[in-house]
Amino acid sequence: GILGDLHIDPRKMDDYTEGHDHWIPIFERAKEAHGNVALVSLGDLGESKNCDHNPDNPDELFAGTSLCHAMAAEFLGSFGVPYEVIGGNHDLEGIDEFRTD
């Protein structure tokens, strides 16, 4: 499976749950048919705006933060198949969290 531009927003996880539920039967059929199943996410894992995730910095973008990457890993891991991420331009935006890149 290929997913692109997830732009995960912690305030809207119901949308991601719905999308997840559409993919699960597809992966299950592929596992039964041949077992060769994997997932690739084409970057832009998190929403590239503030998502009320850091009260200490209300201007911080969600994309690229440790929280964003942890949520993306949890979401992608929930499909029950191996996954890889190809980083996107928004995946490094959470620079407020880190002293340097």
Image (cartoon, grey):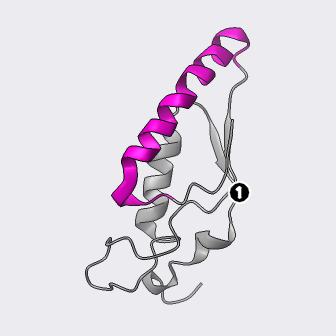
Q: Residue 89, image x and y in percent?
A: 68, 72
- The single residue placed furthest to the bottom in the displayed view is 99
How many numbered circles does the render carry? 1
- Neighbours of disc 1 within 10 Å: few (<14), some (14-19), many (20+): few
Residue in the foreground of this view, choosing between 6 and 95: 6
Q: Residue 14, image x and y in percent?
A: 37, 45
Which contiguous range is marked in magenta? Answer: 8-35
* Residue 84 drawn above or below residue 78: below
Query: In the rendered image, which residue does mark 1 sit on?
Result: 86
Q: Amino acid at mark 1?
A: Ile
Q: Residue at x 66, y 59 (%)?
A: 43
Q: Residue at x 38, y 70 (%)?
A: 51
Q: Give yes or no for residue 29 being in the magenta stretch.
A: yes
* Residue 44 drawn above or below residue 17: below
* Residue 55 drawn above or below residue 40: below
Q: Residue 4, image x and y in percent?
A: 67, 52
Residue 36: quadrant of the picture = top right
Residue in the foreground of this view, choosing between 13 and 41: 13
Magenta part mainly helix, strand or loop?
A: helix
Left or right: residue 27 versus residue 19 is: right
